Image (tube, rainbow, N blue to C red):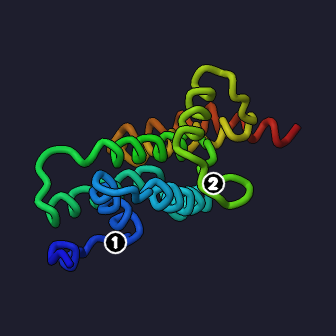
Amino acid sequence: MNEAADSSTVQPAPLYEAAVGFLVSERSNNNAWEQVARYVDAYTRKIVAGEATFLDLKREFRAVEQQVKADYKIEGRMPSAWRSAKSTCLSAARGGIPIINADGKVQPKTDVGKLLKASKDGTLVRSDFDMFAAHIQSAYDIYTKLHGMDVKNAHVLLQSHALGAICQRLAA
């Protein structure tokens, strides 16, 4: 067993294992896509529940990549299969595209990619609520990066536009 793998201190372990799986999958038929997809799906549920943010998920990917690179003495980029899976899963999570199908099975990465493409070119019709939720999450991710007067200005903007319009509509 590789001593570098024993020294892992990064949590979450499933994402770390998936990243290592992509290193191994370059030399075998190991399908680490499913591990990443299941992890992101579970994390997306935490985001929807308000227990985490999309930015937190991106930070976890970054931390895991740094740990794997240190443990396995990798210089440069992670394997292309890992980068592709990461990009696909993060795009799906941000865009509200399902990674897990109704039967609880992981959709093939190619299918998720097709859904992402369809959502960008307008052939995939998402509900108004799904689009609203995705925009709110994007706005929140940006909001968490604001400082000083930008925070105050964001509050004024929300009160005068977004929240005001929502409250008026609810009152009608």
Residue found at x 68% / y 61%: 104
Amino acid under disc 1: Gln
Q: Quadrant of residue 134?
A: top right
Residue closer to the observer: 3 or 56: 3
Identify the residue at the far front of this view. Answer: 28
Tell me residue 150's x, y (percent): 38, 37
Disc 1 crowd, CA 10 A, few/some/many (<14, 14-19, 20+) = few
Residue closer to the observer: 109 or 119: 109
Residue 64 is labelled as none
Amino acid under disc 2: Ile
Reading the chain from its start, which is encountered first: label 1 or label 2? Answer: 1
**Numbered disc in front, either 1 or 2:** 2
Q: Quadrant of residue 95?
A: top right
Q: Point out the image quarter for the N terminus.
A: bottom left
Residue 11 is labelled as 1
Residue found at x 75% / y 36%: 127
Image-based side of 35 in relation to 17, left or right = right
Residue that badge 2 annotates: 100
Q: Quadrant of residue 16?
A: bottom left
Q: Secondary structure at mark 2?
A: loop
Tell me residue 40's x, y (percent): 50, 56
Residue closer to the observer: 126 or 104: 104
Disc 2 crowd, CA 10 A, few/some/many (<14, 14-19, 20+) = some
Image-based side of 104 in relation to 61, left or right = right
Residue found at x 85% / y 41%: 171
Q: Secondary structure at mark 1?
A: loop
